[in-house]
Image (cartoon, rainbow, N blue to C red):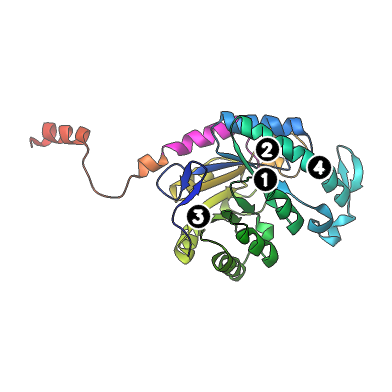
């Protein structure tokens, strides 16, 4: 059974507080630690709770059919496999990320795309494991992530209802109830008429769990709407510039948008209230003035 409240550091997720904000750096650093640090600085300055990366063993995570596909990159023409290896952060870089975030302080984690990467991440005190949509279908990875004892955040993209039911059953059977399901459309960028934000409510009712939203759209309004609809975790890709090279840059938030999005969402819980009909002191005074009692 899913827990109704999950503690991540000094934050409780699942109550009426402001959503937990994850800045998905992913692979937008293009293998450059200075870009990664600037994005970590931005997340911290904008008040986001956590930064997230992606961790792969490209030899295992890249599908066989893609490995030999040639690709034009800023570093010349190379195979897709060589490109993935070129931008992958390893222990030296993650040690530096870990130390950099501790000094701020700022939480960090990553999405493991294979068993080697999960084992790698568990060397660090990451606050939760994020399973990307591509992990749905990898029973071994889901089970191992659950057995780590860390909270699990999992996206639902590229999955049928039956596949998601199966993945959630694994979370229930092998985990401790600390999990969040994030609704997403895995197109980069996703058109607004494909987002189906109402499915978050379906997930909440079907699985009785905390729900969140991982947005890949180009604007802010759908994510704000997701907060209104009950998303307790918000994940958005972030970038220094949409003009940087890379497949995820166009669907990412630049720094000013990171600041704007958090500000737009921070008052939503107060706006929504508790649904009970009440009259505050200000309205009582107006009532007395206009009704006389």
Q: CA distance from mark 3 to mark 4?
A: 31 Å
The circle drawn on residue 87 is: 4
Q: Label 4 crowding class (10 Å Cα cut-off): few <14, some 14-19, many 20+?
A: some
Q: CA distance from mark 2 to mark 3?
A: 27 Å
The circle drawn on residue 98 is: 2
Q: Which residue is mark 3?
A: 211
Q: Main secondary structure of the magenta part?
A: helix
Q: Label 1 crowding class (10 Å Cα cut-off): few <14, some 14-19, many 20+?
A: few
Residue 131 visible to the viewer: yes
The answer to whether marks 2 and 3 mark residues whose Cβ atoms lie closer than 8 Å is no
Please determine whether, in this image, residue 82 is positioned above or below residue 154.
above
Q: CA distance from mark 2 to mark 4?
A: 18 Å
* Residue 258 painted magenta: yes
Q: Which residue is mark 1?
A: 124
Q: CA distance from mark 1 to mark 3?
A: 26 Å
Q: CA distance from mark 1 to mark 4?
A: 21 Å
Q: Earlier in the sequence, mark 2 or mark 4?
A: 4
- Snapshot quadrant of residue 94: top right
Q: Earlier in the sequence, mark 2 or mark 3?
A: 2
The answer to whether marks 3 and 4 mark residues whose Cβ atoms lie closer than 8 Å is no
Q: Residue at x 52, y 47 (%)?
A: 233
Q: Which residues are magenta?
A: 252-267
């Amino acid at each position: 059974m899913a827990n109704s409240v999950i503690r991540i550091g000094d934050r409780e997720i699942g109550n009426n507080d402001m959503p937990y904000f994850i800045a998905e750096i992913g692979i937008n650093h293009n293998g450059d630690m200075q870009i990664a640090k600037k994005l970590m600085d931005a997340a911290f300055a904008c008040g986001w709770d956590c930064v997230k990366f992606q961790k792969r063993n490209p030899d295992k995570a890249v599908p066989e059919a893609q490995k030999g596909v040639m690709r034009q990159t800023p570093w010349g023409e190379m195979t897709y496999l060589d490109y993935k290896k070129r931008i992958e952060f390893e222990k030296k870089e993650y040690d530096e990320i870990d130390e950099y975030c501790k000094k701020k302080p700022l939480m960090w984690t990553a999405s493991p795309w294979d068993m080697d990467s999960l084992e790698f991440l568990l060397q660090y005190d990451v606050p939760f494991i994020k399973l990307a949509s591509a992990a749905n279908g990898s029973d071994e990875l889901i089970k191992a992530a659950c057995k780590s004892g860390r909270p699990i955040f999992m996206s639902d993209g590229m999955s049928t209802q039956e596949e998601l039911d199966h993945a959630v059953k694994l979370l229930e059977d092998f985990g401790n109830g600390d999990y969040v399901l994030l609704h997403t459309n895995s197109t980069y960028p996703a058109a607004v008429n494909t987002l189906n934000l109402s499915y978050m409510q379906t997930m909440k009712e079907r699985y009785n769990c905390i729900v969140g939203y991982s947005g890949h759209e180009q604007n802010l309004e759908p994510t704000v709407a997701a907060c209104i609809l009950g998303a307790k975790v918000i994940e958005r890709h972030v970038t220094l510039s949409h003009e940087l090279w890379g497949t995820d840059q166009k669907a990412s938030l630049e720094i000013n948008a990171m600041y704007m999005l958090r500000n737009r969402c921070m008052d939503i819980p107060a706006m929504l209230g508790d649904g009970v009909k009440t009259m505050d002191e200000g309205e009582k005074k107006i009532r007395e003035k206009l009704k006389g009692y």
